[in-house]
Amino acid sequence: MHTSNSPAVGHEERDRNEAAFHDARIDDDGRKLGYAYASVKDLFGFTVVPREHMHGRVLELGCFRGIRALAMNGFQGRYTGIDISPAAVDHCKGLGLPANFEFRVDNANALATVGDGQVDYAFGDGVLHHLDLASMAPALARKLSPNGCARFVEPAQGNFLLRMFRKLTPHLRTPDEHPFDRASVELLQRHFHVAIIHEALLRPLLPMLCFNSAWSTNVARRMDRWLLRHAFFQQQAWLLLIELRKR
């Protein structure tokens, strides 16, 4: 994701980089990073399709391996999953899901294959920080229906340990992604009413040091709940739960 302050990179070059990166990783089931995410799995429930939209028109940005689509038990609406990676879309088409599930190659910065006003609920896990928010935000706002909403789980800039980890592991991410900062939120606020919940301060670090034991996860969750009431600690959080509603 690039804000107006991000380094200038041609859109076409960035899109090729993103597609190639995810094409090459379509066979990666995510287990390599499973240990780091074990104590925060519950946070990704934030984007699960709400009951009131189980018969509606749902859009997933960045469907990749189709994990979320596979988990949508009882869904009776129309689901569209998009990804910039042709390999990802081919993979999802081979999952054998019912006819009300559709997968398309599309650029989430433009959402060119999605009709205006045709989305009741949009969601994505770790996708917005790969995008050009100045382009994506107005595009998504046009696609949402009048009472539509969108939810995303995104990484924030976080504390110095997180920033150091990113610098030491560039192979785990695309060269153009950019964790959320204040400028990112301000770009979204131009087009949406934005609500943000800060999460994962002591999680996942404390649980990881304790082999992701249940007691350490519970302790970290309770301490996070208290510490993240305060603005200073919110700026150190790893994950943001973001809800967008049309203005």
Image: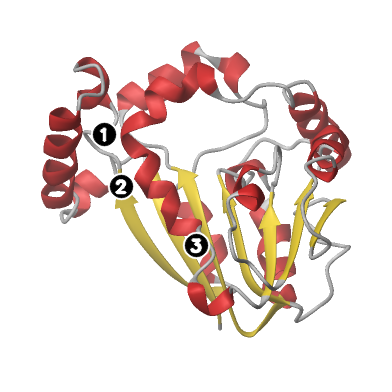
In the rendered image of this protein, does residue 167 appear above or below residue 100? above
* 124 vs 244, nearest the viewer: 124
**CB-based contact (under 8 Å), mark 2 and mark 1:** yes
**Where is residue 168 shown, x and y percent of the image?**
48, 11
Discs 1/3, front: 1
Discs 2/3, front: 2
- Residue 24 appears anywhere in the view: yes
**CB-based contact (under 8 Å), mark 1 and mark 3:** no
* 209 vs 17, nearest the viewer: 209
- Provide the residue designation for mark 1: 203
Work out how far the residue at label 2 is from the one at label 3, CA to CA, in angstroms. Answer: 19 Å
Residue 186 image label:
3
Give amino acid for label 3: Glu
Work out how far the residue at label 2 is from the one at label 1, CA to CA, in angstroms. Answer: 8 Å
Residue 199 image label:
2
Q: In the visual, does 240 lie left or right of 56?
A: left
- Residue 4 appears anywhere in the view: no
Residue at 67% x, 35% y is 7
